[in-house]
Image (cartoon, rainbow, N blue to C red):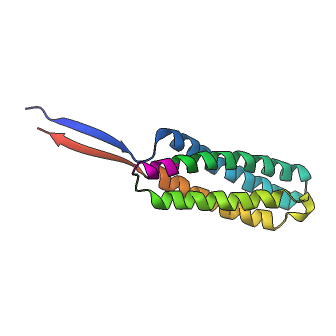
Amino acid sequence: MYSTVVVTRHWVIHPFPAAVLGGVLPLFLGALLADYAYWNTYEIQWSNFASWLLVGAMVMTTLALLGGLVGLVRGSRQVFYVVVLAATWIVGFVNSLQHARDAWAIMPAALMWSVIATVLALLATWLGFASLRVRVGGAL
């Protein structure tokens, strides 16, 4: 007697927004680390690095948010994921505006906004990738 195991993968998040979402956290984390380095050294180039990393993070967050909104329109139930991703986008935008100021004027607010954005990006990434469900069922 043979038994078969059927593994079904049900994607709640589409693979493209999932791939884009994979870049959100590292870019926000890189901006946080660059802000921390600037806070410690006051080398202006660290502020420039953080600004450019924020640009990349905002592009990735925008694409992931658009994918999440399309998923909601198509019937996904990941409302909390999209809300957290929208909050990440808003905080990232405020952080980008903070980084647009003079380099000497951005601290300590830029570091605070980077911490908040990174924590929200971590939560959004966790919620987005937790939506992959694997069901294992056996058939005789």
**Figure quadrant of residue 107:** bottom right
Q: Position of residue 69 (x, y in %)?
A: 51, 51
Residue furthest to the front: 73
Q: Position of residue 65 (x, y in %)?
A: 57, 51
Q: Is residue 136 magenta?
A: no
Q: Is residue 50 left or right of residue 118?
A: right
Q: Main secondary structure of the magenta part?
A: helix
At a point 49% along the width and 52% down the height, the residue shown is: 128
At a point 45% along the width and 53% down the height, the residue shown is: 72
Residue furthest to the top: 2
Q: Position of residue 45 (x, y in %)?
A: 88, 49
**Figure quadrant of residue 90:** bottom right
Stretch in magenta: 68-75
* Relative to 85, residue 10 above or below: above
* Relative to 56, residue 1 above or below: above
Quadrant assignment for the N terminus: top left
Quadrant assignment for the C terminus: top left
